[in-house]
Image (cartoon, rainbow, N blue to C red):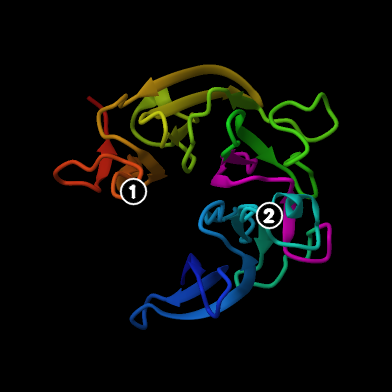
Amino acid sequence: MAYTYQTHTPNTRMLNRILRHDVGNDWAFEEIVSGIPGATTHDGGRLAVGPEGALYATAGDARERDGAQDTETLNGKVLRLTLDGEPHPDNHFDNAVFTYGHRNPQGLAFRDDGVLFSSEHGPDRADEINVLEAGNNYGWPDVMGDSGGEYTDPLVSYTPTIAPGSAAFYDGPISQWQGDLFVPMLKGSYLRRIRFDNRTVTEQEQLLVDEFGRLRTAFSGPGGHLYVTTSNRDGRGLAKDGDDRVIRLRPA
């Protein structure tokens, strides 16, 4: 099975939904989650299957910022579901909501110890890297960046903003990158490497600076290599010959 997150307009209102595909049957699909608020921006849309077998999905605030603080709605949340699309039985609010208070979460990445990290767009400041824990409130729209403990604070935030895309932990053939988090940047047009000691940032590095334009998705692929996709044909980038493309990083 494979899963996709789709923004669509079934009637006159824009919505998001999650589809499950049967890859052995010409990718036939069924809708397993519907009615997630949608908009022309701030839709989230990242999916990940956790080590315990749950399906996680990011849902942006869909330009309805106050909804991010309402645990009865699905916008401005990270959702946790069964693989059949039902709310996970361990969720805190008797629905699909895993965490709330998000503006536009873009990336989900599980570290090898099972801890879930996310990347998130702020408005004009405070793009964030967070650790997600069930039931926690990450502050949007009441606060951006550190709150002094009133909400769950990010591990690190970035002002000026850098527009992070997805997130991926590395476990491949480049020994000096082992266990590091890689986050592609849309605004900054580079790949950021972040090293943690537990939950403390100890090192950061910028890679591929201005080489390939806007970068959206990083993921591990065959051979444990790190792959990065460009995003220069989305109306916000400057497309070059060959765009968009998938880039593979490997040892020199």
Q: Which residue is mark 2?
A: 64
Name above or below for residue 4 compared with residue 114: below
Seen in the image, is 136 located left or right of residue 39? Answer: right
- Which quarter of the figure has residue 185? top left
Q: Which residue is mark 1?
A: 235
Give the extent of the magenta segment. Answer: 92-119
Residue drawn at 22 percent across, 24 percent down: 252
Dot 2 falls on a residue whose secondary structure is loop
Residue 9's spot in the image, x, y percent? 51, 73
Name above or below for residue 26 compared with residue 101: below
Q: Residues within 10 Å of mark 1 (few under 14, many from 20)?
A: few
Q: What residue occupies the far left of the structure in this picture?
A: 241
Task: Kindly indicate whether the residue at mark 2 contacts the one at mark 1 (C-beta within 8 angstroms).
Answer: no
Nearest the camera: 111 or 11?
11
Q: Amino acid at mark 2?
A: Glu
Q: Amino acid at mark 1?
A: Gly
